[in-house]
Amino acid sequence: MTHIQDIAQSGNPVLAARAQEVEDPTSPQIQELIDQMLATVDRAGGMGIAAPQVSTSKRIFIMCSKPNDRYPHAPEMEPEAIINPELVSCSEEMETDWEGCLSVPNTRGLVARHTHIRVRYLRRDGSRVERSFSHFPARIFQHEWDHLEGVLFPERAEKLMPEDQWRDMMRSAAP
Ligand code: NI
């Protein structure tokens, strides 16, 4: 049975550490960790989760973009485990948008991210991938990448806002 993991909260040292490379993505321990992360991010309704958030300092994250009430225009993506990611290149062009994090409760922040990125990583079957992401998925990738470097989004935010105030603002801005 796959257990839902507690999510480490801001202030926990595991979130500030640089996570370690994964030696064998196909090992039973890593496969179980990925299953736990998939279950945990699904239960929490997140768009991504990084291994340090479940208190495991390994270079793995899950991306699982889907439309929700916070991000109605987010693309639907099959949840995917990203292992030992590398950033190959980043566009000079940046985009600024609101972010939140399962490890930073009741907070939204306005964060500039590269609009387009080229990345390499391993899949959970050990296969190598090189591909590009743009816009919202590129934002998720950069946010989760930061977790592996020990960085939380408030450190990058040009503006922070309590979640309830942010919701009111977004509601009043809706057409
Ligand atoms: Ni996060």
Image (cartoon, helix red, strand yellow):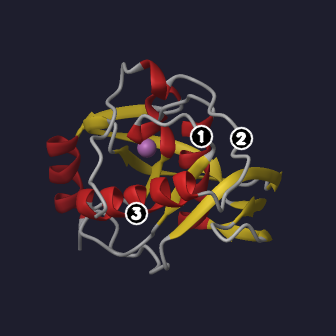
Residue flagged by tag 3: what amino acid is it? Leu
Residue 81 screen position, x and y as percent:
56, 63
Q: Residue furthest right?
A: 88
Where, by quadrant of the figure, is residue 57 drawn? top right
- Spatial CA distance of label 3 from label 1 is 15 Å
Which secondary structure, mark 1? loop
State if disc 1 and disc 2 touch (CB < 8 Å).
yes
Q: Which residue is mark 2?
A: 21
Specify which label sits upstream in the sequence, 3 or 1: 3
Residue located beneath label 3 in the image: 38
**Is residue 172 among the parts visible in the rendering?**
yes
Answer with the quarter of the image where residue 116 lies. bottom right
- Tell me if the residue at label 1 has its CB under 8 Å from ligand 1: no
Which quarter of the rendered picture does the C terminus lie within?
A: bottom left
Identify the element where label 3 is drawn.
helix
| Mark 2 or mark 1: whose residue is earlier in sequence | 2
| Residue toward you, 44 or 70 | 44
Q: Secondary structure at mark 2?
A: loop
Residue drawn at 63 percent across, 27 percent down: 18
The residue labelled by disc 1 is: 58
Q: Residue at x 54, y 48 (%)?
A: 144
Ligand 1 quadrant assignment: top left
Which amino acid is tagged 2? Glu
Q: Check if mark 3's residue and mark 1's residue have beta carbons within 8 Å.
A: no
Kindly identify the amino acid type of the residue bearing the numbered disc 1. Lys
Label 2 and label 3: CA atoms lie apart by: 19 Å
Where is residue 73 drawn, in percent x and y? 40, 76
- Name the image quarter holding the N terminus: bottom left
Q: Which mark is residue 100?
A: none
Residue drawn at x 47%, y 25% is: 14
